[in-house]
Amino acid sequence: MDLAATFGRDAWRRRLAALWPQRGEARAPNIPVRDWIHVGSAKPARLLGFDQALVCVAIALLALGMVMVYSASVALPDSPKFERYASTHFLLRHSVQIALALLAALVVVQVPVAFWEKAAPWIFITALVLLVAVLLPFIGKVVNNSRRWIPLGVINFQPSELAKVAMAMYAASYMTRKMEVKENFVRAVWPMAVALGFTGVLLLREPDMGAFLVIAMVSMGILFLGGVNGRMFLASGTMLVGAFVAVIASSPEKRLRIFAYLDPWDPEYALGKAYQLTHSLIAFGRGEIFGQGLGSSVEKLHYLPEAHTDFLLAVIGEELGFAGVAAVIVAFFWLTRRIFHIGRQSIALDRVFAGLYAQGVGIWFGGQAFINMGVNLGVLPTKGLTLPLMSYGGSAIVMNLVALAIVVRIDVENRQMMRGGRS
């Protein structure tokens, strides 16, 4: 039985529009009737299942990241610092970390979104406890003068990565619960400001200003998308920018990074704070259009520090050229746009927490990727942020895939509701 033929396409669309939730969208999405339902047809409906394109793009970025991590780290054992490591050391560890992350994602995608909405405050409190714990000398591990990791054997867990997921959940949960007071600055913004401020103090003690910047973007973005008054949002943003300026002004090292960013080729900076940036720019210059070929990077041979983590894009630029970098940028743009689409779809279905959380993850992935790419290309000052899904880092990969798994679950529940079922 073809419902569209029976009632007529316009009449059937009017029936859907009447049933569609009015909150967030005034009408049903402009989706052809054949994509909504197939009765008595062997062809499956397009709304069944999950967003396969989203999963495929994420897996493609993971696969490319694994290849480039190996390429960027294969020569590290030639350095005295890594002389006890095998050439495949980072590849094997990265593979194990990805396997753990995929296993965690498969578990998380089975959990209903309602569970995360209820657990959001407790997950946020857990993240804060771990941020405090990592600062304790007998728990936290110091690497490159930063105390950011808790050793767990297989991986060194970084609580700031959990804090990104926790803040996206907590901010989405908070805005869902406080919808009725979003026009009152003190009642709507102040509690979130306290939570963000406490998180920022703990992160700056590590120090990890990059993670704080991402978490601030996520929380402010969710406040804005949740409907906080524009003047309140502008005031909050101004205070946040002022806080970042004050932190930079109070730290001679951070001020020096800004000066090095403004003139990286100055001899005073080229061998100091701008060393990574100048060699990253050299790598992009050598790559030209199609690159020097996979494995043919020169800058990874102990010229560009941390090439397999923060500056992985520079190795991609040198080996795969402009074409490879452009492909990565397009993939992240598409991924971010798709996550935002799932979020908007959830809000249209009156699932506010799910929609705001998904959009928060979109801000996280898009914002962090933009900052990492900007740092590699010399557009932004040097900041220790990895490229999501691609750079070496166990806890980052695990939290990236856990966050995406929840987004996939949101999409699955959206599709169930659009078929007339329950989420």
Image (tube, rainbow, N blue to C red):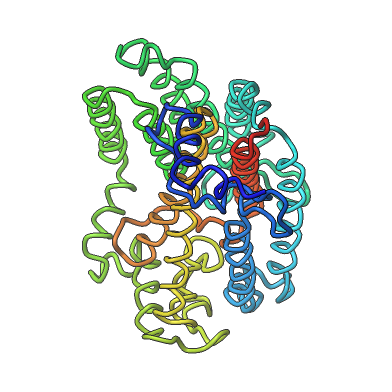
Horizontal relation, residue 122 to residue 240: left or right: right
Measuring from the top left, give residue 278's x and y in whole percent.
34, 71
Which of the two residues, 145 or 285, is positioned nearer the viewer here? 285
Q: Is residue 290 above or below residue 253?
A: below
Furthest residue to the front?
6
Residue 263 quadrant: bottom left
Residue 214 quadrant: top left
Q: Is residue 234 above or below residue 397?
A: above
One can see residue 356 in this view: no
- Which residue is found at the position 26% from the left and 34% from the top? 246
Q: Quadrant of the C terminus?
A: top right
- Which residue is found at the position 67% from the left and 44% from the top? 157
Q: Is residue 19 above or below residue 287?
A: above
Horizontal relation, residue 374 to residue 214: left or right: left
- Which residue is found at the position 65% from the left and 51% from the top? 38
Which of the two residues, 15 or 197, is positioned nearer the viewer here? 15
Measuring from the top left, give residue 191's x and y in whole percent.
42, 15
Which of the two residues, 219 or 157, is positioned nearer the viewer here? 219
- Counting every numbered tag in the picture gives 0
Measuring from the top left, give residue 210's x and y in whole percent.
43, 45
One can see residue 92 in this view: yes
Horizontal relation, residue 254 to residue 48: left or right: left
Which of the two residues, 29 or 72, is positioned nearer the viewer here? 29
Measuring from the top left, give residue 76's x and y in whole percent.
62, 74
